[in-house]
């Protein structure tokens, strides 16, 4: 339970839809659980590996199960 994946998209221009460029699994994240033992909240930090040579607007989406 709680597995998730992160999908990264790049939108280069108004003429084309965003394209998926990268996928990350939950095990590659830096995640922290809440210190409250009754809480199910947690936060994860993901970094998109890119260079300054990659112009465009970037979006991410999280798919979770459990």
Image (cartoon, rainbow, N blue to C red):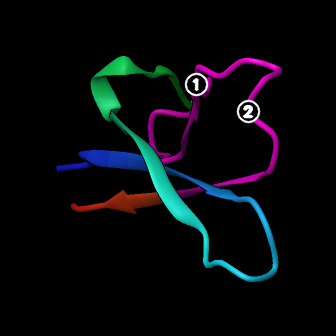
Residue behind mark 2: 54
In this rendering, the answer to whether 35 lies above or below 58 is above
In this view, the residue in front, 29 or 53, is 53
| Disc 1 secondary structure class | loop
In this view, the residue in front, 37 or 24, is 24
**Is residue 24 toward the left or the right of residue 2 in the image?**
right
Q: Are marks 2 and 1 in contact (CB under 8 Å)?
A: no
Residue 23 percent across, percent down from the top left? 37, 41
**Picture quadrant of residue 28:** top left
Crowding around mark 1 (Cα neighbors within 10 Å: few <14, some 14 to 19, many 20+) is: few
Q: Is residue 51 magenta-colored?
A: yes
Q: CA distance from mark 2 to mark 1?
A: 38 Å
Of helix, strand and loop, which mostly describes the magenta segment?
A: loop
In this view, the residue in front, 5 or 10, is 10
Residue behind mark 1: 35
In this rendering, the answer to whether 24 lies above or below 11 is above
In this rendering, the answer to whether 32 lies above or below 18 is above
Residue stretch rendered in magenta on the structure: 36-61
């Amino acid at each position: 339970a709680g597995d998730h994946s992160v999908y990264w998209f790049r939108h280069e221009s108004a003429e084309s839809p965003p394209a998926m460029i990268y996928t990350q699994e939950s095990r590659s994240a830096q995640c922290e659980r809440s210190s409250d033992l009754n809480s199910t909240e947690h936060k994860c930090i993901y970094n998109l590996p890119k260079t300054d040579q990659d112009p465009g607007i970037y979006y991410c989406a999280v798919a979770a199960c459990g």
